Image (cartoon, grey):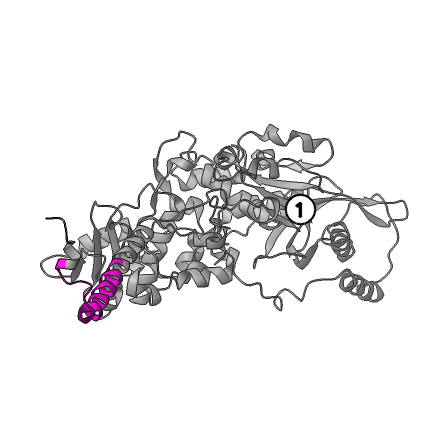
Amino acid sequence: MFGRSALHRAGGFRPENLGQNALNLMGNIGFSLFVVGVLVFTIIAATYEPEDPLFHPSDKITTFLTSTSNATLRSDDSVVKTGEDFMAVNQTAFAAFINITDVEASANEENAEGNQVDCDASVPIDCKDSEVFHLMMKATIERFKDIHFYKFGKPAVGEGANSCDMAWRYRPKDGKSAAFYKDYRRFVIHKSDNCSLSVASIGDYHSGLNARKRKRNQKAAVNDSLPTVESDKAFKSGKYLVYVGGGDRCKTMNHFLWSFLCALGEAQYLNRTLVMDLTLCLSSVYTSSGQNEEGKDFRFYFDFEHLKEAASVLDEAQFWAEWGKLHNKKTRLGLHLVEDFRVTPMKLADVKDTLIMRKFGSVEPDNYWYRVCEGDAESVVKRPWHLLWKSRRLMEIVSAIASRLNWDYDAVHIERGEKARNTELWPNLDKDTSPKEGRNLYIATNEAELSFFNPLKDKYATHFLDEYKDLWDESSEWYSETTKLNGGNPVEFDGYMRASVDTEVFLRGKKQIETFNDLTNDCKDGVGTCNVAAT
C-alpha cells in the first residue's frame, strides 16, 4: 500500500508535466509574496507615527507636507515652534540700522549750528534737549554691542531732576527670527561743574515707563479683540466653514495645531471664513493638576491679532448669534452638511450655500479634523503655518529674558525627563546630557529636578526659566493683561506657555546646542529610528 508515493501516483515528476508544475510553483510563490507584502504594509501603516512637523527646519516642513501619512502625531512637548520660527529673515530690511557714527555726525552738525550759552550746573537736565538725546543714543549703542538699533524715540522726563526715559526699536545683531523688539529704559544723567553731560547709569529692561506711555487714542499694544460683523447684509453675503465635534479636544497642543491648520487651510482653499472656537481644552501634559482643563483661551497662547489680520476668521459664538438672528422663515441661509471626512475639499469647491458644516463623529481616529487634509487633499490644501504665531504677551517675556542676558548668551536644550530614565530606547542619553564644561548658558529643559545642573554653577553662570518668574507673577504686565482677557480671573502660566518661552529664548542664543543633534548619539525617537528621522 505504501510502495508508491502520492507524487509518483499523480505523475508529478513525469517529463511531460515538468513545465506545468514549474508554472504552478512560481504562481504559488508569487501569491505568497504578495500576501506577505500586504501584511507588512498594513502593519507599517497601522503603527507608523510621523515626527511632528513643527519641530523640523523649514526645508523639512515642505518635505513633510508633501508626504502621504495619516497617523497620529508623535510630538516632543519640550520644544514649541510656530510659524514665525520658520520665516526666512529678510536681511535687506534689517540692513539699515543706526550706527554710533550716525549719532555723532548728527550731534556735531547740531552743535555747529547752535549758539553757545553760559554754563549753570544747577539747572535741571532738560530731557528734550538734543544734546541729551544724542548722549543717550550714543550711550545705548555703546552699552549694548550685540544689538542693532533701528529707531530711537524722543526722551521723556523720568523720576527726579536728573533722569530721562527713552524707548527704542531693535533686534539682536545675530538674530535668527524675522522680528523687531521694543525696549524703554531709565537713564540717570550727570552734569559736571562745567556743564558737560554724561550717562551715569542705564536702568533694567522696560524700566523707562514714561517713554512707553501711549497717547489717549492710540490702540492697545496687543489688539486681540474679536472681529466684528460689519452688518447683516455683509454677514448674509459671506461664505463660511465650520468644524463641529470630533476627537481633537484635550489632545496635545501639537495635535490641535495640526488639525486647526487643516481647517484653516481648507477655508482658504474654499475662499471661506473659518468659524473658530476660541476656547481650548488644555491637555493634562501641560497642566499642574495633571488633568485636562477646559476654558482656556486661544489668545493665551497664540497671536490672534496677526491671525485675524492675515486670514478671514470669526468667533464661533459671534457667528451663531448672527446666524440665529438672520436665519428665519423670511431669510433662509443655506447650510451644506458634510459628515464624512473622505468628502474632499475639492468636491466642495462649487457649493453655494452660506455655510459648510463638517460634522465629526465619536470614533477615533476617523473623527480627527486633520483627516480632511489626507489623501488627495494633501497636495491641494496647504496648512498656513505662517499665520500662526506665538502670543505677543509670551514673546514680551522672551524679549525680557534675552534683554536681561544682554542678548549675549549661548543656549542648550536638554531633553531628559522620562527619556533619560528609559535606557532601553535611549541608552546613552543620561550620561551624554550630564553637566560638562562650557561658557555661560541658558538651559531650556524638561528636566524637573534642576538640582541636576548644580555642578555647573561652580564654573558657569547658568540660567533657567524659573529665574524670571517676576515676568509672569501677580505684579507683572502679563498677569494683568491675561487676567483682563480672562474676564477678571487669573491665568496660570502653564506648561505649554513655559515650553513656548523656553523654546524662543533658546532660539535667540548665539550658539544653540540640541540634545539629539549635538550632545548624544541616541536617536530622538528611540533606538533604530535615526535613519527614519533624517529622511
Q: Is residue 436 left or right of residue 39?
A: right
Write down the residue under mark 1: 410
Is 10 covered by the magenta stretch? yes
The residue at the point 78 percent across, 56 percent down is 131
Residue 269 to residue 258: above or below: below
Residue 169: percent from left, percent from top:
63, 56
| 73, 360: nearer the viewer | 73
Q: Nearer the viewer, residue 402 or 291?
A: 291
Task: Find out whether residue 328 is within the magenta segment.
Answer: no
Looking at the image, can residue 82 be seen? no
* Kind of residue at disc 1: Asp
Give how far across and how far down residue 97 sits, in percent: 68, 63
Above or below: residue 313 compared with residue 461: below
Q: Residue at x 24, y 49 (%)?
A: 367
Whole-percent x, y for residue 143 in the image: 76, 49
Q: Which residues are magenta?
A: 9-32
Characterize the magenta stretch by its predominant secondary structure.
Answer: helix
Observer-nearest residue: 478 or 257?
257
Residue 328, percent across and down?
A: 12, 57
